[in-house]
């Protein structure tokens, strides 16, 4: 092989990697993707030529995926090591297709919300307002802390709450905050906040399912959480 041929072969071997970085992986052909997997060719047969031969020999990616290691090794330049790389790549692709997304937790009842946040607020000494974002089936997407107040007051604005819902494409949400005093009964400001958020949700078509206030459980104390929906504050 001449010096110019060696330079040409080396440039061709690097080209798919450079194209991936510059143009993105979707711009690469099947042969270029295989070239990146295989890494190098053999004497007199560059990696791109091996990749093209492999595709031509098997006729399709599906047929190549079904081939065993001896069948893959029938293509010039493919030894056992390269055949194992190909088999591993197809096995990962198969597992990706079969992989199911993790089941999202249902969070729509006040007791579920209280359980979800109990440990997070257990030792808080100030009021913290959280927005729990839900999909159309009321399954949990994400929980965000919206604001952190002083000793017994928490501030919240619809803009701060609903920007999280819009960003994460939530269909519904639940507000929740803690009362460090341990008494979860709503204050006048809690009721005003709830109604303000409820009206904003109606305008934005993002349903506010509930506003749950968490206290601290204890013997002889009031219930450790209160649902403002169950208290009737969503209907006045």
Image: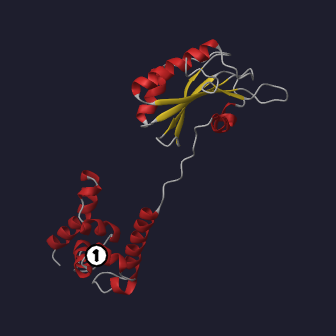
Reading the image, the residue beneath label 1 is: 41
Horizontal and vertical percent position of residue 99: 47, 61
Query: Can you tell which quarter of the image residue 95 is in?
Result: bottom left
Q: Residue at x 62, y 12 (%)?
A: 188
Q: Residue at x 33, y 69 (%)?
A: 39
In this rendered view, identify the residue nearer to me: 86 or 164: 164
Horizontal and vertical percent position of residue 124: 69, 26
Q: Residue at x 52, y 40 (%)?
A: 138
Badge 1: residue crowd in 10 Å (few <14, some 14–19, many ≥20)? some
Q: Is residue 104 left or right of residue 213?
A: left
User: Which quarter of the rendered picture does the N terminus lie within?
Assistant: bottom left
Disc 1 is placed on an element classified as loop
Q: Is residue 97 left or right of residue 176?
A: left
- Eyeballing the image, is 187 above or below 6? above
- Eyeballing the image, is 75 above or below 206? below
Horizontal and vertical percent position of residue 184: 70, 23
In this rendered view, identify the residue nearer to me: 213 or 35: 213
Check the image and name the residue furthest to the top. 188
Q: Residue at x 43, y 28 (%)?
A: 163
In this rendered view, identify the residue nearer to me: 87 or 162: 162
In this rendered view, identify the residue nearer to me: 127 or 15: 127
- Eyeballing the image, is 61 above or below 224? below
**Figure disc tally:** 1
Query: Can you tell which quarter of the image residue 62 is in?
Result: bottom left
Q: Is residue 45 left or right of residue 114?
A: left
């Amino acid at each position: 092989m001449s010096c110019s041929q060696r330079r040409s072969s080396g440039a061709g071997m690097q080209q798919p990697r450079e194209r991936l970085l510059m143009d993105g992986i979707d711009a690469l052909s099947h042969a270029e993707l295989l070239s990146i997997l295989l890494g190098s060719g053999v004497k007199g047969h560059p990696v791109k030529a091996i990749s093209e031969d492999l595709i031509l020999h098997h006729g399709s990616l599906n047929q190549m995926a079904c081939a065993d290691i001896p069948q893959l090794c029938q293509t010039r330049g493919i030894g056992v090591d390269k055949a194992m790389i190909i088999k591993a790549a197809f096995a990962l692709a198969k597992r990706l297709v079969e992989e199911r997304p993790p089941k999202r937790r249902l969070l729509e009842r006040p007791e579920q919300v209280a359980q979800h946040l109990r440990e997070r607020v257990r030792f808080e000494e100030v009021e913290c307002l959280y927005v729990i974002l839900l999909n159309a089936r009321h399954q949990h997407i994400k929980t965000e802390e919206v604001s952190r107040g002083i000793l017994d007051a928490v501030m919240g604005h619809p803009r701060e709450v609903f920007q999280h819902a819009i960003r994460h494409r939530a269909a519904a949400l639940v507000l929740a905050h803690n009362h460090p005093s341990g008494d979860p009964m709503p204050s006048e400001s809690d009721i005003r906040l709830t109604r303000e958020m409820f009206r904003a949700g109606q305008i934005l078509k993002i349903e506010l399912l509930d506003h749950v206030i968490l206290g601290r459980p204890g013997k002889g104390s009031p219930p450790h959480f209160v649902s403002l929906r169950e208290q009737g504050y969503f209907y006045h």
